[in-house]
Structures are given as structure tokens and as C-alpha cells.
Image (spheres, rainbow, N blue to C red):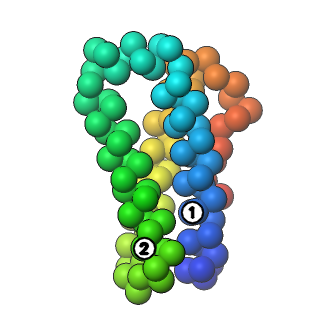
Amino acid sequence: MSIQVRVQNLLVQIEAESFRLCRVESHPAFKSWVSREPKLSEGLASVRKFWQIFCDDVSQDDPLVPQYIDQVEKTTTDISRSIDQMYQALGFDESLVVHNPN
């Protein structure tokens, strides 16, 4: 698969996962978790920053993107699994789970 197709697939996945993350963060039970584990909120902020850096690099045609796309794909897949677990713990509809298209 070409780098351009992989980048586009990853951008779509990041958008979907960001939406799912917003849903998780707005759930009352999640807010309770964060009050007990403040590091959770910091971790999610790091995830958002990681994704933003990648999106910025793509929009600026950074020539290094092909060198680190494998890591971004792996990390995003791992994050997606964590969001799946949060979805399940919070009782969200499993039909809304997004899976990596790669």
C-alpha cells in the first residue's frame, strides 16, 4: 500500500478515534475515573497532541512522515484498543467501535 493511501487511512482513523475519545470523556463515569486517576487525563492529552503533530506534519508535507508512519499506525491501533475497552466499560454500543482499516 502506498504511503499516501496509508496516510489517508490513518487520518480517517484518527478522526474517528478522536470522536470516540470525546464520547468517552463526556461520560459521567469517565469523569469519576479522572477524579481518582488524574494521570488518565494527562495521558489522553498526550494522545491528542501526538495525533495533532502527525496531522500537522502531513498537512505540511513533512518528508519524514514515511519514516515514522509505521509507529503512528501501531500506536493508533493500540490507542483504539484502549478506547474499545473504555467503550465496553462505559456500556457504549459496540456497533460504534471503529477498527483499523490497515
**How far across and how far down the image is residue 90, in percent?**
55, 18
Query: Mark 1 and mark 2: span between their CA atoms?
Result: 13 Å
The residue at 39%/13% (across/down) is 32
SS at mark 2 in the image: helix
The residue singled out by tag 1 in the image is 10
In the image, residue 97 above or below residue 25 = below
Q: Quadrant of residue 57?
A: bottom left
In the rendered structure, which amino acid carries the disc numbered 2? Asp
State the residue position of label 2. Answer: 57
- Which one is in front in this view, the residue at disc 1 or the one at disc 2? 2
Question: Residue 78 has which mark?
Answer: none
Q: Is residue 92 above or below residue 8?
A: above
Answer left or right for 94 relative to 2: right
Q: Nearer the viewer, residue 11 or 79?
A: 11
- Residue at position x 65%, y 44% in the image: 98
Measuring 64% from the left and 23% from the top, which residue is drawn there? 92
Q: How many numbered marks, from 0 up?
A: 2
